[in-house]
Amino acid sequence: MTENTKAKYLPFHAINEFMRDDFRLTVLQDVLSKLDSIGKENALHINRLITKGVQIPGFRNSSLAPLGIKVRQCVSLFESSQEFAALIVDTWSHLHQPLMDAVWKLVEDRNWKPLPLEIDRTLLPGFSTNWPKADTFESFEQALHEKMPELNENDDNISLMVVWVGNKLPYGLYEDSTP
């Protein structure tokens, strides 16, 4: 393989460049508030990463801090840890299963060739930067609202799910195409 034919990936925590601060907090809140319902193994993994990567004054074990404090303190870990960011977004996606199924069908219809939903995306090297210029977040949002208005999902959720299910960030859209 030559340098030009190699796939280019951005680490999972690069998602932070595309997320608003308030939405990042919403995703963390959503996941951390539902740790009891996500499966013991995932919950243990998330708590282990929090214990290792987050210092909360007054708590030897940061994962035992009150939810609001823990959410705010986990932002820096989400911004800096590829493993934590991938695990949080993966867990979040499974909490929104109907949206995940609908988005998979939508990106498949646009010939993105998404991986099957059963694949553990956290094991991938990161997000592909190969994003078709014709596909915008707005076009996905509009298409999903038209096809499935009963989902009642906000545009931020749809956009994040497109990124996760499609395993792509729109980074390539902004690259200069001149050598």
Image: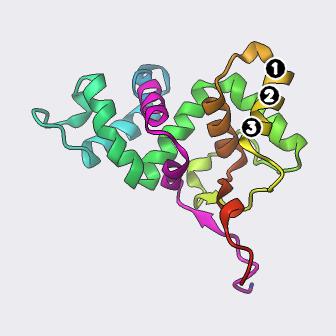
Classify residue 2 by image quadrant.
bottom right
What label sits on residue 39 in the rendered view? none
- Residue at x 71%, y 76% (from the top left corner): 6
Q: Residues within 10 Å of mark 1 (few under 14, many from 20)?
A: few
- Give the residue type at disc 1: Met
Query: Could you tell me if the residues under marks 3 and 2 are in contact, i.e. CB atoms within 8 Å?
Result: no
Alpha-carbon distance for marks 1 and 2? 6 Å
Q: Magenta part of the protein: which range?
A: 2-30
Closest to the observer, 49 or 164: 164
Query: Could you tell me if the residues under marks 1 and 2 are in contact, i.e. CB atoms within 8 Å?
Result: yes
Tell me which label, 1 or 3, sits earlier in the chain.
3
Q: Furthest residue to the top? A: 150
Tell me which label, 3 or 2, sits earlier in the chain.
3
Name the side, left or right, on which 150 lies relative to 97: right
Which residue does the numbered mark 1 point to in the structure image? 148
Closest to the observer, 138 or 83: 138
How far across and down, in percent of the image, does residue 174 sit? 67, 62
How far across and down, in percent of the image, does residue 49 sit? 34, 45
- Give the residue type at disc 3: Glu
Which residue does the numbered mark 3 point to in the structure image? 138
Closest to the observer, 103 or 62: 103
Which residue does the numbered mark 2 point to in the structure image? 144
Instruction: Classify the position of the C terminus by image quarter.
Output: bottom right
Point out the frontmost of discs 3 and 2: 3
- Is 142 colored magenta in this rendering? no
- Residue at x 57%, y 54% (from the top left corner): 123
